[in-house]
Amino acid sequence: MGNLCALLKQKPLSSTNNSKKLRSSNAAASSNRWSRTRSSRKDKFDDASIREQAIAAAILFKQHQQQLQNGAAAFDRSTSLRYPNGSSKKNALPRSSSSRARSLTDPLLQPHQLVNQGIKVDDLETNHFVLVHGGGFGAWCWYKTIALLEEAGYKVSAIDLTGSGVHSFDTNNIKSLSQYVKPLTDFVEKLPEGEKVILVGHDFGGACISYAMELFPHKVSKAVFIAAAMLTSGQSTLDIISQKEGSDDLMQQAQIFLYANGNDHPPTAFDLDKSLLRDLLFNQSPAKDVALASVSMRPTPFAPVLEKLSLSDLKYGIVRRFYIETLEDNAITITLQEAMINASPPEKVFRLKGADHSPFFSKPQALHKLLVEISKIL
């Protein structure tokens, strides 16, 4: 995401190079949920290959988890809770001041940090998580979170938004936020009568789950924003990210605007320079996940980023909100996250130490524990 305003002034790239179709499909393409079925490899970088890589990585991750459990992995203080009532720092639980060297593993949390351990999954209002990716990502980015939650007894659905992941639609042809989030709103709308879900949004996915919360407040038990755009009514995502102080050289270098309608028209989408992905989004993430992202990420449609949300107290306002901050985030900085939290305080705010903009890669176990904890908050 980042400071898009500054980039609009840059010299546009050739429309010939920037308007290539990513995939062909009709505009009525339905939502593609995360697939667990292996497909034969047709090409090294085609959709089937990408899904195979993610599934294989998930299997390896499960095996690694079992090894850690058998070896009685040590705990660490990777997260902390603040603003327990959404408004005051005085009552916050103390943060750990410990420091540790970063490793490829992600040890579990201290038991004292999880206050609802006695509650069983089957006794919850809902045990169904719906995971919504951020701009450029897809359902594939949640593969570790899916594995961990399912092993813990939860039901998990990961959504590919329009033109994202394996959803076959040209990103340049997305004209509105409603079109972009249609796979999500269709999914929530079709939930059985009386069934509720926990919506989890990352990055631009925060605006997307907010849109769904306004439409279906009684089908959403809780909403979790992970380093996400948490808007107030009348704001667009562009309004939020334009609040960043000073220039963001890394983001400005990474963003590439696409002009499918020609250079004399507004951008239709924006992409990210693959050579800068690690520093921008994955500065604490394992190399294998950066490699997966480099062949899986797609451009983000520009029109939805510009669209202002209409959020009401009677709908969006009745859904319980929680925010998870990522402290090593180079894309949506902690300063910007704090600004959104202060503008519209959620019920509780958690902090993930050592997490970059993609905590589902950099801190998967700690993120999992927080999601479980949030699901058990009465």
Image (cartoon, rainbow, N blue to C red):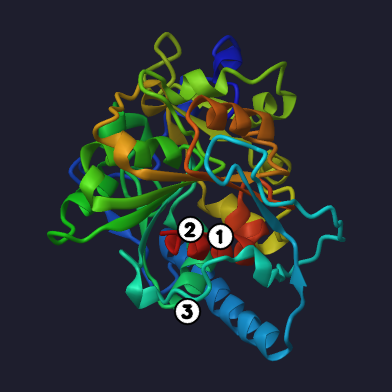
Is 363 placed above or below 345 here?
below
Percent from the top left, x then y, of residue 371?
A: 50, 60
Within 10 Å of the Cα at label 1, are there few (<14), some (14-19), or many (20+) other Cα atoms?
Answer: many
Q: Which disc, if any, is residue 160?
A: none
Distance from label 2 to label 3 (Cα)?
A: 17 Å
Pointer 3 or 1: first along the chain: 3
Q: Residue furthest left?
A: 193
- Label 1 sits on residue: 370
Amino acid carrying label 1: it is: Leu
Q: Residue at x 58, y 9 (%)?
A: 9
Tag 2 near tag 1, CB within 8 Å: yes
- Label 3 sits on residue: 151
Quarter of the picture holding the N terminus: top right
Q: Residue at x 51, y 57 (%)?
A: 141
Q: Residue at x 62, y 86 (%)?
A: 66
Q: Would residue 35 be visible to someone looking at this image?
A: yes
Q: Secondary structure at mark 2?
A: helix
Amino acid carrying label 2: it is: Ile
Tag 3 near tag 1, CB within 8 Å: no
Pointer 2 or 3: first along the chain: 3
Quarter of the picture holding the C terminus: bottom left
- Label 2 sits on residue: 374
Is 44 placed above or below 186 here?
below
